[in-house]
Image (cartoon, helix red, strand yellow):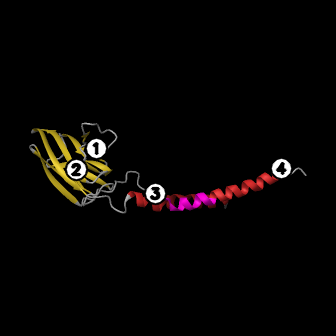
């Protein structure tokens, strides 16, 4: 009788696990493309797609870069230049002279950046260099990035820190009160 109960419980556990288990090789969600721009890069055309439009400063989005003939047999480099003239480094392997284009983690047929936020508003320049079967090509895509969405950063931080401004004096008052009570206990000898 006890063996049957254990076997029934094990069978129920296996059945429940097989219905609720997540597949090991689940495909990542595709990148939602809401806007694209075509750029002439020497003999090549590159479609630059965005997961958010219009572009706003400090707002995360995905960039996809897709040459018209695909990325097979191609090498690419991009140099994002901020409105202040500084080279932006969107990834950890980025260098001062640009970033080698790599496959986007959720769109493996394209190059791209996953979850990048452009830090300042203004006109950004994306300078492309592509090497492929038709030789080397260069081109520039200029994009207008709007101001940061939401309230100004100082106001947002001030509102966020208001609860802390109330907790600190209350905590100090409680600490002071409990310290006095402890001090009385220490100095009484009888």
Q: CA distance from mark 3 to mark 1?
A: 42 Å
Question: Secondary structure beneath disc 2?
Answer: strand
Residue 121 place in picture, x, y as percent: 27, 54
Whichever of labels 1 and 4 marks the residue nearer the N terminus, that label is 1
How would you rate the neighbour count of disc 1 (Cα within 10 Å): few for under 14, some for 14-19, many for 20 or more? many
User: Mark 4 or 3 closer to N-term?
Assistant: 3
Dots 1 and 4: beta carbons under 8 Å? no
Q: Do the residues under discs 3 and 1 have CB atoms within 8 angstroms?
A: no
- Tag of residue 178: none
Foreground mark, 3 or 1, reads: 1
Residue plotted at (31% across, 45% down): 90
Q: CA distance from mark 1 to mark 4?
A: 64 Å
User: Is residue 7 at least partly visible in the picture?
Assistant: no
Viewer-proximal residue, 84 or 100? 84
Q: Residue at x 33, y 61 (%)?
A: 149
Q: Residue drawn 77% across and 56% down?
A: 181
Relative to 49, does residue 137 appear above or below in the rendering?
above
* Secondary element type, mark 4: helix
- Give the residue at mark 2: 124
The secondary structure type at the circle numbered 3 is: loop
Residue range (magenta): 161-170
- Comparing marks 2 and 4, which lies closer to the viewer? 4
Q: Which residue is mark 1?
A: 88
CB-based contact (under 8 Å), mark 2 and mark 1: yes
Dot 4 corresponds to which residue?
187
Is residue 55 magenta-colored? Answer: no
Q: Where is mark 3, residue-wise?
A: 21
* Mark 4 burial class by Cα count in 10 Å: few <14, some 14-19, many 20+: few
Q: Earlier in the sequence, mark 2 or mark 3?
A: 3
Query: Could you give the CA–CA distance between mark 2 and mark 4, rounded to whole angstroms?
Result: 70 Å
Would you call the spot at circle 2 few (<14 residues within 10 Å), some (14-19), or many (20 or more)?
many
Seen in the image, is 21 located left or right of residue 141?
right
């Amino acid at each position: 009788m006890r063996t049957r109960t254990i076997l029934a419980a094990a069978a129920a556990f296996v059945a429940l696990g097989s219905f609720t288990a997540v597949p090991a090789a689940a495909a990542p969600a595709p990148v939602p493309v809401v806007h694209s721009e075509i750029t002439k890069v020497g003999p090549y055309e590159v479609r630059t797609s965005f997961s958010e439009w219009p572009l706003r400063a400090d707002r995360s989005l995905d960039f996809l870069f897709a040459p018209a003939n695909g990325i097979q047999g191609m090498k690419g480099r991009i140099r994002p230049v901020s409105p202040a003239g500084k080279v932006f480094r969107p990834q950890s392997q980025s260098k001062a002279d640009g970033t080698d284009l790599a496959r986007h983690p959720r769109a493996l047929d394209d190059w791209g950046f996953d979850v990048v936020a452009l830090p300042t508003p203004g006109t950004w320049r994306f300078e492309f260099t592509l090497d492929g079967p038709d030789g080397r090509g260069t081109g520039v895509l200029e994009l207008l990035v709007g101001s940061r969405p939401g309230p100004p950063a100082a106001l947002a931080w001030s509102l966020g820190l208001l609860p802390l401004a109330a907790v600190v004096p209350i905590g100090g008052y409680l600490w002071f009160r409990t310290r006095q009570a402890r001090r009385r206990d220490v100095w009484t000898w009888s």
